[in-house]
Image (cartoon, rainbow, N blue to C red):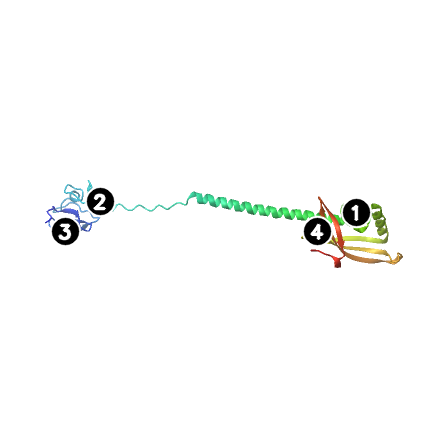
Amino acid sequence: MDERSPGWYVDERGDLRWWDGQGWTGHVHTPSDVPEAGPGTPDAAASLPGSASGSAYGSTSAGVAVAERTAPAASPVRPQRPRWILWTVLVVVGLLVGVVVAVVVTLVSDAVRASEQERAAVAAVEGYDAAWGDADCARFEASTTAELRESLGYADCAVFVQDAEIFGETVQNYEQSVTTVTRRDDGTVAVRTEESYLNLVGVEGEALAEPEPFLLEYEYVVVPVGEQWLINDFYYPEDAQTP
């Protein structure tokens, strides 16, 4: 038979229960209901585990034993996102921005270059027209390739000047307007024009009583030669060959 004196002890289930000297009672202790000493009741602090009567907790103080049993669990600490992830995201975003900027700059540069090349091609066509109107062989050569001049029979400046002067005497009000400018797959530029004038002579070379109006369309093929853009060929509309 258990001969312990009355007091608070840990029972078989691990609860702190009152032992009356002969058996367990229905009084179970929780951290908030430590009984105060009173008449007929042993001093609770003296009989708590860790008192002189001994305890299953093995603590040196009743207060410590209760504190160990009732201490609240620590709040979980929210894990922090590793900083390397943030730096990785920043680096990736920076690289993407750099790629986008590079692409935009390339596209803009290509557009500017294409625009400059197209303007140079148009300038060659306009120079060709002005050369015929002024019988200017130097300008004619500056706007055409040697291959074109050879094919037209104008390798000699004197021949060109003679024909240009005849042309100026037989037409009036010659006007040229550019209608389209197209970059072709082979790297050349096609410039289409409408050219109008009044013809002053007939097929036999006779002077016409009334000038005869003409409206023609041409497509000039302008090619890069070094840093210049020169006319290398031209067609009537029905013969135009734009790739």
Would you name the residue on which mark 3 appears? 24
The alpha-carbon separation of the residues under discs 2 and 1 comes to 111 Å
Find numbered disc 4 in the image and state the secondary structure of the residue it sits on: strand
Q: Which comes before the other along the chain, label 1 or label 3?
A: 3
Q: Is residue 13 left or right of residue 217?
A: left
**Quadrant of the image for the C terminus?**
bottom right
Disc number lying in front (4 or 2): 4
Q: Earlier in the sequence, mark 1 or mark 4?
A: 1
Q: Residue at x 48, y 44 (%)?
A: 90
The answer to whether 48 appears left or right of 200 in the picture is left
Which element type, helix, strand or loop, lies under badge 3? strand
Kind of residue indicated by mark 2: Val
User: Separation of disc 1 and disc 4 at Cα?
Assistant: 19 Å
Q: Position of residue 128 (x, y in %)?
A: 78, 49
Q: Which label's residue is closer to the chain start, 3 or 4? A: 3
Left or right position of 143 against 105: right
**Horizontal and vertical percent for residue 157?**
83, 46
Instruction: Give the label, 3 or 4, closer to the camera.
Output: 4
Q: CA distance from mark 1 to mark 3?
A: 126 Å
Dots 3 and 4: beta carbons under 8 Å? Answer: no
What crowding class fits label 4: few (fewer than 14 Cα within 10 Å), some (14-19), or many (20 or more)?
many
Which label lies toward us, 2 or 1? 1
Residue at disc 2, secondary structure: helix
**Residue nearer the viewer, 47 or 203:** 203
Q: Which mark is residue 66?
A: 2
Q: Nearer the viewer, residue 225 or 203?
A: 225
Determine the CA span between mark 4 and mark 2: 96 Å
Q: Which residue is mark 1?
A: 140
For marks 1 and 3, give the one nearer the viewer: 1
Instruction: Name the residue carrying label 4.
Output: 189
